[in-house]
Image (cartoon, rainbow, N blue to C red):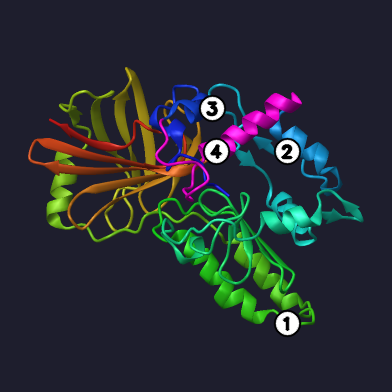
Amino acid sequence: MMRSCHAATTYKADMTSDWVESYFTTPPTHPAGTLFHYDTSAPHTLCALVEKLTGMDMLDYLKEKLSPLTLSACSYMLKDPFGVSMGGTGLVALPMDLLKFGFFLLHRGNVCGKQLLPASYLDMAVSDLSATCVTAPLPSEAQGYGMQFWRGERNNYVCYGMGGQFIIVFPDCGLICATTADTQSIAGGNQQIYDALYEEILPAIGNTPLPETPETGRLLSYTLDSLRLAPLPQTALSADIQKTARMINGKNFHVQTTPSAFECFSLQFDPEETASGSPTGGSLSFVLKKQACTVVFGIGQLRTGSFPLYHLNYAASGAWLSDGTFYIKAHIIDSYVGCVQFQLAFKENSLTVFLRKKEESLFQEFDGHLYCT
């Protein structure tokens, strides 16, 4: 029902302190059981309770109880810094695992003739138990909330994962949709997924299966094989931008903002150029927490690497923006999902850096403004 006494996730105030403890020591904002506020620390605490009472990791416990679903062996759960499975945001699984759990829900807990949970309990869990219309930023999130399930706009219900990882169940037509995405940096991105389903998929559902044809199979395979992360779009480089690029290329700028864990920044472009005269890519170097760090990026293409300090795979591209600032976007493509963005504004002999991260638990250093000379 998500009606705890907290209006926000408690452990995010200090992620170096015990996450579960924060749920019990953070002063309440309102009486428990009264109002809906989405609080990721609540399911995280529930997960800690399950692990404490069973003596098992949360996912091992779930796989045991849901064994007829034969969930994949490669699925796992991330853990918080204190060894507790991240019950609010840490499950990593295959799309087929999501579909199988959706099958379990659609059939009200019955799998291959075995009733794994009482149907009446699941009916209540997916029903509208808490009003969400006041806090919801999107229509898809304003339809109510059950027991860890969101209600949808078409009498559907949703397992609502971070950044568009969804299991969407439509009981009226027997449809299960599993999606994987990263919408964290896209305003209204989750609603785009819902609207695509409502406008493109639901109207095409009939009472009889569609015939399979080689042509549609080839088209589907081609579409799936063509899916790629897109690099940042490029704009024509004005004479002023080209002059700025030459002036700042490889120059070291020292951070003046205090306090800061960053010491300096340097933007370096490749000597190779594309047919349009732009560099093929480059690198952003900086010193963070006394460590030399580098993020490589492509221009008009993506380049991959291991993100400094966190050792997570990323794919990054860069582009000059119309206002003469240089923008780098690094997609995190690992067990954690999100992006880290850098906007670099060069003016005379100074550099202003705007750092912005879109990720649930990490990269706190990469948020804010820095002034450098």
Quarter the C terminus occupies:
top left
Q: Are marks 3 and 1 in contact (CB under 8 Å)?
A: no
Q: Residue at x 86, y 54 (%)?
A: 111
Is residue 304 on the magenta stretch? Answer: no
Q: Is residue 137 above or below residue 261?
A: below
Q: Nearer the viewer, residue 319 or 100?
A: 100
Q: Does residue 27 show up?
A: yes
Q: What is the spatial separation of the Cα atoms under label 4 and label 1, in whole angstroms?
A: 40 Å
121 relative to 288 in the view: left or right: right
Q: Which residue is mark 1?
A: 206
**Which residue bears the numbered disc 2?**
74
Q: Earlier in the sequence, mark 2 or mark 4?
A: 4
Q: In percent of the image, x 27 and y 60: which residue is there?
A: 235
Residue that badge 4 annotates: 42
Tell which circle, 2 or 1, labels the residue nearer the N-terminal end. 2
| Magenta stretch holds residue 41 | yes
Region in magenta: 27-55
Observer-nearest of 238 and 123: 123
Foreground tag (2 vs 4): 4
Nearer the camera: disc 2 or disc 1: 1
Residue picked out by circle 3? 20
The earlier-in-sequence mark between 2 and 3 is: 3
Cα distance between the residues tagged 2 and 1: 35 Å
Q: CA distance from mark 2 to mark 3?
A: 27 Å
Front position in the image: 27 or 263: 27
**Mark whose residue sits in front, 3 or 1:** 3
The residue drawn where x is 77% and y is 43% is: 72
Q: Amino acid at mark 1?
A: Gly
Q: Residues within 10 Å of mark 1 (few under 14, many from 20)?
A: few
Q: Are marks 2 and 4 in contact (CB under 8 Å)?
A: no
